[in-house]
Image (tube, rainbow, N blue to C red):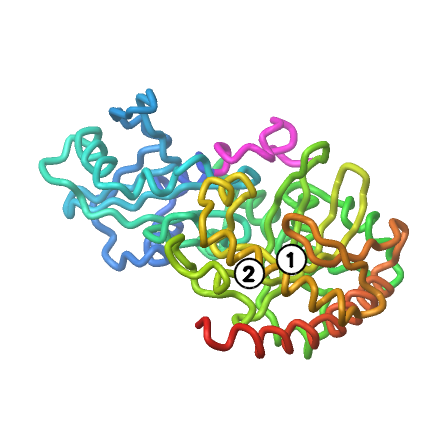
Amino acid sequence: MDIFDILGIGSREDSYTDLIAYAFEHSTEFREKMLKMLGEEVPGNWEVFVRPSVAIKSESGRKKDVPDLVLLNRSGPKVLLIENKIYSGEGWMQTERYASDEFKSNLKEYLKLDTIPEVNYFFLTLDGTKPYSKDFKAISYSDILKCIPENLGQSRLDILLKELKGRLEEYYSWPSPEEDEIVIDYLKKTDRLVSTYRTFIILTDSLLDKGLASQFQKECGITANPGSGYIPLCSWYKESWISKEYPQEKDGACCYNIHFEFQWDTKDDSLSLYLHYETNPYMTQKELKEVGGNFVDKYQQARDEFFDYIKNNPPKEWKIKKTPLGVAHYEFDKGIRFGELKKDVNSLIKSMTRIVDNYVNSHFATCN
């Protein structure tokens, strides 16, 4: 058990922000490596602000914004703003707010600057998760790991950096499941920074055979359904299966996002593979109803035609069922072992991919 665990701060993102800030201030090697990693070649005259309370005026009643870490080079002036997430997700409009001109103006007042500074934005997560704002660059703790000095001594800072290094190395080297390992047992086998979401990511990274995986792009995330706990999910899709983002005044028949989605419902430990047909960008059923009109009619008609095609050409393993998002699904045995799961997932995706490809090539050729 290390200091993080003894103090009960191993899962608190503020603890990691504080350590990064302290190392930036007190370790020349860490600071120089971190600045280079963030694209700053000149050391400059840097100041550190941890969770600064930046006063704002907002119609929502919010009186302040509190970014995790602000690094200021007064000789610029230049600001590096870092929003840090360990386990929590991005707050409501968080990165968009920080990237706004209004926030930069308020930050200028907080930092007591004469002019609005140049600001570079970074979103720090364990896995390099993309932020909502395109002004933010995604970075990961693997980048922070490279900033830790190679030769660490016995100072308080060095001891904490050793522990951080150990935690991160464990996180990024966590083993994949064994072929005969029960999947649910593997998913729940965690330690320190390694959460069930991390084990889920590693498992799904290993699910598809290389030849099949090369045909798809992969994205993972977390969702929840009414009555369920949190649900880690992973989707696989081809570029041809997703339309351009269509505004509501365009043809709803050309608005689609078709993908496979593997889910682990942590409430009852069910494992499922789905074929989804959604809007692009994603809209809830409530949002679709609010749009209404010709767009929704054409979208629903195109979705119905896709469902009918799958229903009339069904791979025998899949259960065909129309839901607000789904078209087909498959439920795995809760005691399934990884080797069997991998075999089944590859077989299911291969059989359905041929059918989806045929439909997309014949029905959506004129959309993009």
Please name whichever residue, 368 or 344, is drawn nearer the observer in this view of the structure: 368
Outermost residue on the left side: it is 114
Q: Which residue is mark 1?
A: 276
In the picture of the structure, the residue carrying the numbered disc 2 is: 257
Residue shown at 62%/56% (left/top)? 172
Residue 180 falls left or right of residue 61: right
Type of the residue with mark 2: Asn
- Where residue 76 appears, as percent x and y from the top left, is 15, 48
- Residue at horizontal 52%, vertical 53%? 297
Q: Quadrant of residue 45?
A: top left
Q: Residue at x 66, y 51 (%)?
A: 233
Please provide percent x and percent y for residue 332.
84, 55
* Front residue of 276 and 173: 276
User: 162 left or right of 184?
Assistant: left
Residue 148 in sight from this viewpoint? no
The segment highlighted magenta reads 1-16
Mark 1, residues whose alpha carbon is within 10 Å: few (<14), some, or many (≥20)?
many
- Quick check: 334 above or below 350? above
Is residue 144 in the magenta section? no
The N terminus sits in image quarter: top right
Residue 8 inside the magenta-drawn segment: yes
Q: Judge whether residue 312 can be spotted in this image.
A: yes
Alpha carbon of mark 2 to alpha carbon of mark 1: how far?
8 Å
Mark 2 element type: strand
